[in-house]
Image: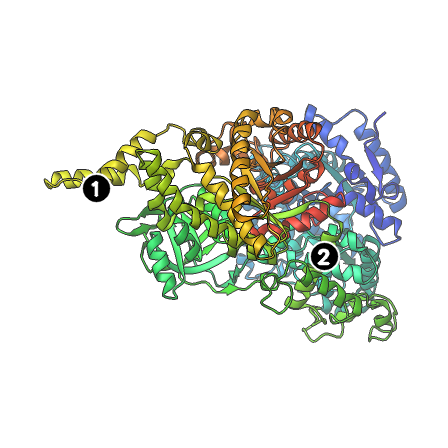
Amino acid sequence: MVRYVYDFTEGGRDMADLLGGKGSNLAEMVRLGLPVPPGFTLTTEACRAFLETGSAPAGLWEEARAHLTDLEASAGRVLGQPDDPLLLSVRSGAKFSMPGMMETILDIGLNDDSVLGLAKVSGSERFAWDSYRRLVQMFGSTVMGVDSSRFERSLTLLKELRGVQDDVHLAASDLAELVDTYKNLIHLETGDQFPQSPAEQLRRAVLAVFTSWNGERARLYRRREHIADDLGTAVNVQRMVFGNLGADSGSGVAFTRDPATGKPGLYGDYLPDAQGEDVVAGIRNTVPLADLERLDAASYDGLRRHMRTLERHYRDLCDIEFTIERGTLWMLQTRVGKRTAEAAFVLAAELADEGLITEDEALARVSGAGLARLMFPRFDTSATGSVLARGVPASPGAAVGAVVFDSAAAVRRAAAGEQVVLVRQETTPDDLPGMIAARAVLTSRGGKTSHAAVVARGMGKVCVCGAEELTVDSEAPRCTAADGTVLEEGTVVSVDGSAGAVYAGAVPLVDSAVIRYLEGEDGRGGDGTRGVVDAAARADRGEDGGHGEADLVAQADQSEDGGHGEVDSVARADHSDDGGHGVVDAVGRGEDGVVDAVARALVRADTVRRLEVRANADTPQDAERARRFGAQGVGLCRTEHMFLGERRKLVERMILAGTDAERGRALAELLPLQRRDFAGILRAMDGLPVTIRLLDPPLHEFLPDHTDLAVRIATAQARGEEPDPHAVALLSAVNRMHEENPMLGLRGVRLGLVVPGLVAMQVRAIGEAVAERLLAGGTPKAEIMVPLVGDVRELRLVREEVRHVLAEVSRASGVAVDCPVGTMIELPRAALTAGLIAEEAEFFSFGTNDLTQTTWGFSRDDVEAEFFSAYLDKGVFSTSPFETLDREGVGRLVGIAVAEGRATRPDLKIGVCGEHGGDPDSVHFFHAAGLDYVSCSPFRVPVARLEAGRAALGETGGSDSR
């Protein structure tokens, strides 16, 4: 028989699946001997059964009645008895914390008779009627469905009539009158009476909490936090304790450390003469928790002891709710507290230093998503103005600059020392110079995987895409916001890539100390590994302000902690000068503390991870930055970006060539330019692998826009002039090369097979760059990657040409040039025939952007703006498959390709170079799938390093601070 109810004395924190987070933690506090009001938990299994059938499962109420009888016996009172009633609270408690998303009902058991008994036994008529009005209000809105604002309006009106501002100044007679008002309101709105039966109140309250699991706000929260919909919530039924019994009572919320910074201390709020819901609701101003020492020293000291006990037991930051009833302290809840990214890193390092957790556990406590937030600059949110527009937060960070509407203007203004924001409807490869010059990119179209988004993330550039409230007129040039605000060229705006928001004017920025560290600008780090190793070494030697392996227990023995002789972070706050909030100026905190904590996490991740981390880099500057950030090579060097700018004319000549000789001359002029590009990247990554992808996009992308050419020719004809022959030739080429779906047309390996000399030129440039580095004493490790292969015969033909060209280079240079040849797996057919393709490929690299497109049948530049939001709302996606790898579909293809590829070639090197290579959750999948490396944009390299380490420890891709 399934058991649905557990007493608090029967559970523990390892039963969160069944008892929910709140119930399991209440049981754990009971096991620790802390003062917890007695009660019992109705399980998540009961909730799921109710949600599935619409009625309580058989036996639930009988079990609950038996536990209630035990509770009544221990209390010496009966639920709702007229003379001295036992009152209960009914609270939700899912496995994962969902604060405020589900329901709570207090004071179950009060009715028109028992309220009089409560007044007599408590000696406070006002307290009794205040408790009753709370029950009627909560029950009416939560259980009976009356709009809560109706109750609030009645309360506000009564306070206005009595000329008071706070509830505490209402008399008992006022509250009794309010109870009648509330009951009449319920009857008017629902046609039913407020139930006088305590048993009915309890039963209906439990079912209301179960039902709230599927409430709109709960579902929205779960979608945002990626919490499964089928978990259900437990319900905790607990004897009421009262913080609203007068000046010697109250309620509060406490943290064992600062959840914003990780600093040790006593943090939280306290509200005298109030129940816990009042603290959360903010109906009155709270006082700092440290003020409790003055108000009730005994309770304050007890709370400190319990906080120490909980932090040492949970070995983590604890979030605590408590109530003081006439001088008696009661613990109502604890959970591992949520914290900022900054606090997560600092706290993990602190707890490791204190010996509460291991270095591996410290690594498990932080996340790549948190590190990414620390790397990007942020706006001072207290100084932001009204939002001009919102879009897709495509690349995080914050930037301020003057609006420009074309790439040339961005380059020109930036060269003059001006900070600019490039605003376009959407970007193209031709916008790359302007994107490089700009501090941020803002588009009115596109999504997180649009050109603007992908390139901006690769450069660590702030980007907001799909800001549809902006109408961009590049010809004017200007853009207009939905409220009519017009942004002319030169207008200053602030772009928040983390929130997807655009503000008028300059919002102050907060610099990232972590990025300065990684770049080496603060005198530390900046070389990929030495900086983090040095940080760890400093910690071992205690040169980091006392963090290292310092014995903080011994420090406490000699500190002003009242002789506790233990790690008493709470006590240390008592001697701070922050007005009692416990914000201490601890050694090594602040920016340096965060940087050292990040450094320690990274060095630990590098020690334990199996996956290598490479970078996607197209320029020597990108490669140098990637190496500073810890990249172990280049996993993707895209050669198409090398054909833009002034070189575009040479590409046009190649495309327009009427003979092989003309094409050959154009390619010959491109050769030394490509060789110089490759030589620079190989020099920056000397000794590390550099995977160079042969030309991938369709050639028409290197030609002028069809409409622009047609307008130029038509304008000349309208004036009676002879059109420019070159423009006519270009228009003819554009028309000839037009494709309905160019991303599935003549591109990738197909280009190399049908455009004579193209592969040979690129391979020769690579080979000669390798020879140049070898002759200079370097150790180049170039790898040649063929894109969009769908059949092994395609790769075989290209590989033969590669061997032939490299042999020629070897003979001409006098040094052996040997570059491994592999392919991108970005088509389902390639994944399904990986065993055959591995006969020719020396390595695989999954191009997961295109593999996702071709598996789902999506055009990524269109679908995000068209229907992804609807898919997310309807639960088709929990997250975009272009952000986090689709494990069931695309992931299965990856698994097939890995298994079949290595069955053919056991030493096959396999990596990934799509955007998923830097996504925390996807990194964990690639580790489990057996890949050798991930490759991502330089700015995501530290994130991938961290997550690769966490994956090796078996941690999930999410944060532990949920």
Label 2, residues with CA under 10 Å away: few <14, some 14-19, many ≥20: many
Residue lying at 31% horizontally and 40% vertically, measured from the top left = 705
Mark 2, secondary structure of its residue: helix
* Nearer-N-terminus badge (2/1): 2
Mark 1 sits on what residue?
712
| Amino acid on which the number 1 mark rests in the picture | Arg
Picture quarter with the N terminus: top right
Image-quadrant location for residue 426: top left
Residue lying at 86% horizontally and 49% vertically, measured from the top left = 30
Between residue 806 and residue 692, name the one nearer to us: 806
Mark 2 sits on what residue?
603
**Colour pattern:** rainbow
**Residue at the extreme left:** 720
Q: Is residue 500 visible?
A: no
Spatial separation of the CA atoms under disc 2 and disc 1: 58 Å
Mark 1, secondary structure of its residue: helix
Expressed as whole percent of the image width and height from the top left, the position of residue 567 reads 83, 65
Q: 455 left or right of 889?
A: left
Q: Is residue 623 visible?
A: yes
Expressed as whole percent of the image width and height from the top left, the position of residue 296 reads 78, 67
Image-quadrant location for residue 13: top right
Expressed as whole percent of the image width and height from the top left, the position of residue 435 reads 42, 52
